[in-house]
Image (tube, grey):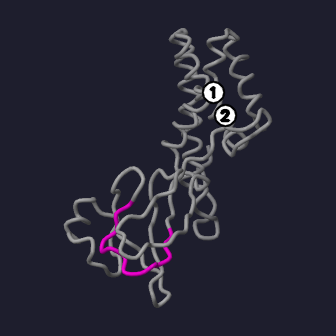
Amino acid sequence: MSLTYAEMKTAIQDYTQNTEATFVTQLDRFIRSSEEKILKNVQLTIFRKTATGVFVSGNPLWAVPSDYLAPFSFAYTDASGDKQFLLMKDVSFVQEYNPDSTDTGGPLYYAHHDEDNFIIGPTPSAAFVSTLHYLYRPASLTAGSTSATTWLSVNAENALLAGALYEAYIFMKGEADVLAMYEKTFTESIMSMKSFGESKEIQDTYRTGMVIRERT
């Protein structure tokens, strides 16, 4: 089962039995809010991405991708062709370690300098090829055409819809028991996704064996 963008909007209106104009204008926000909660609460490999760049010799800053949220690893290939992984530190640590940004060398550390850049220490001494493995923000279902789908709307449509319905019912100032039901459904869907993303998705039965449950 999967839901297109148009089907998701229709489902929200059908479940809430609300087609009032002001409500309809908020449908995209309900969907995006649900996507945001899933993204921030569930570790899925589908939300991982790799970006390759080049250090600029003499420049301690490295621009992060526009869809960047958080790092998994940051590395560069040195002059010998070996990959060197940088250690993440606080920005003050990097600045204190390399107080004169004109002093260059093989990078050891990186930190968030601002919203758009990492600061590297020491300042790169050459145009080393760099690789960032990171958590990224995928395009929203609302950014596509009416027939568009996303990974979430195809593989986690129950969680996405439940989250949107919860947001919709808050907007409607609906009955407390119905709101609690939607919250419970969304929470259960999130827990199911966490079990998949933080257990099943990152191990195989060759190494860990099949899950054996006690007979009742």
The quarter in which the C terminus is drawn is top right
Name which of mark 2 and mark 1 comes first in the sequence.
Answer: 1
The residue shown at (48%, 42%) is 40
- Identify whether 115 is placed above or below 15: below
The quarter in which the N terminus is drawn is top right
Q: Is residue 24 magenta?
A: no
| Residue assigned mark 2 | 142
The residue shown at (55%, 23%) is 167
In the rendered structure, which segment of residues is drawn in magenta? Answer: 118-131
Write down the quadrant of residue 51 in the picture: bottom right
- Cα separation, mark 2 vs mark 1, equals 6 Å
Q: Is residue 127 left or right of residue 193?
A: left
| Residue assigned mark 1 | 28
Query: Callout 2: 10 Å neighbours few (<14), some, many (20+)?
Result: many
- 1 or 152: which is nearer to us? 152
- Identify whether 209 is placed above or below 22: below
Q: Position of residue 143 (x, y in %)?
A: 67, 37
The reply to whether the C-beta atoms of the residues labelled 2 and 1 are less than 8 Å apart is: yes
